[in-house]
Image (spheres, rainbow, N blue to C red):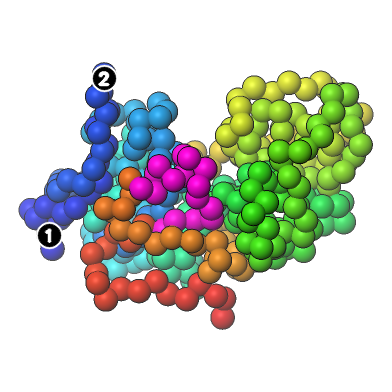
Amino acid sequence: MNPYTEAFPAYRIHAGQGAHRAGLERMTLKPPTAGEVVIEVHHSSVNYKDALAALGRGKILRRSPLVGGIDLAGEVVEAPGTAFQAGDKVLVTGCGLGESHDGGYARYARVPAEWVIPIPEPLEPFEAMAIGTAGFSAALAIQRLEDNHQNPDQGPVLVSGASGGVGSLAISMLDGLGYRAVALTGKLHLRDYLQAIGAHELLDRRTLEMGGRPLERALWGGAIDNLGGEVLAWLTRTVRPWGNIATIGLAAGTELHTTVMPFILRAVSLLGVSSANCPLERRTALWSRLATDLRPRHLDQIVTRVVGLGQLPEVFHDLLAGGARGRTVVRVRDDPEERPPSLNQP
């Protein structure tokens, strides 16, 4: 197929005053200019931001219409004036995909070369999207903890929002590194799942006693928080001396009400994680780790759905309703013979 002259399927989002719609359309690309890469997309994934954008639940889109999908993985078609060659297996996560630039929910994508990461062996495009932005964010959080001297001897690391994509992958990675991962969740019916992916202990978020003192009993060596709000404030009060909290998400709120006491009496560090604008050098190095020591050992359990572009609306609604767990991979390339490869490590 020639993507410049033949129309291909894409999941496009139209946002405007009083009108919002999204669905499958057919489109073509303009040929690349020097420094751009055209990619045949094999797989993408579904993230919380994707669902918000597609359903018009948040101010995600910076222009309209736009192809959704903040992740993509596939093969280079054409890349004039770059180091990439046709057939190279590559990925792009974040960088404005699905927000200000057409994203991964289309058979072909054209992106700036500085966004493109070679898929490190032995990962394949399917595995790269099983990890995706969620896994990259989890890995970046762990890297931030490690850079600030976190180690397993400091005690258990609590992961909030444990059954979601970021939480699930963080638990799996922490377990692989020798940490004792504790899952904070409101979905205790997923106990078997969370234990299978590496959680050593579960806490019920619905019955959590947070207290209100500036400092509560020190419980955790560190934490990776996907929720924000009251949970993040509680973590500042309960992390042990010289421990770290990596903050990723805001599912429970954007405000943070705490005191300086944990920071000046226990030397607790609060570390921000922003995957979308991570510098290329750091992004490339971290993807190398995601193919080696940070490679999740439980991807076969964490990937709970593989869907086509036409199934996206159902997935988006499930995700925002709290009915999803783990990761959803989107099969973009229209190849009926293609089957997801084994996700188990060799």
User: Which label lies toward us, 1 or 2?
Assistant: 2
Would you name the residue on which mark 2 appears? 18
Q: Is residue 334 above or below residue 110?
A: below
* Image quadrant assignment for residue 19: top left
Quarter containing the N terminus: bottom left
Q: The residue tagged with tag 1: helix, strand or loop?
A: loop
* Extent of the magenta region: 314-329
Residue 229 colored in magenta in the image = no
Q: Residue furthest front?
A: 189
The amino acid at mark 2 is Gly
* Horizontal and vertical percent position of residue 293: 65, 66
Q: Are marks 1 and 2 in contact (CB under 8 Å)?
A: no
- Taking 40 as reference, is 202 left or right? right
Of labels 1 and 2, earlier in sequence is 1
The amino acid at mark 1 is Asn
Q: Residue at x 44, y 45 (%)?
A: 318
* Image quadrant assignment for residue 220: top right
Q: Residue at x 71, y 51 (%)?
A: 183
- Taking 3 as reference, is 59 left or right? right
* Horizontal and vertical percent position of residue 73: 37, 59
Q: Is residue 92 visible?
A: no
Residue 317 colored in magenta in the image = yes
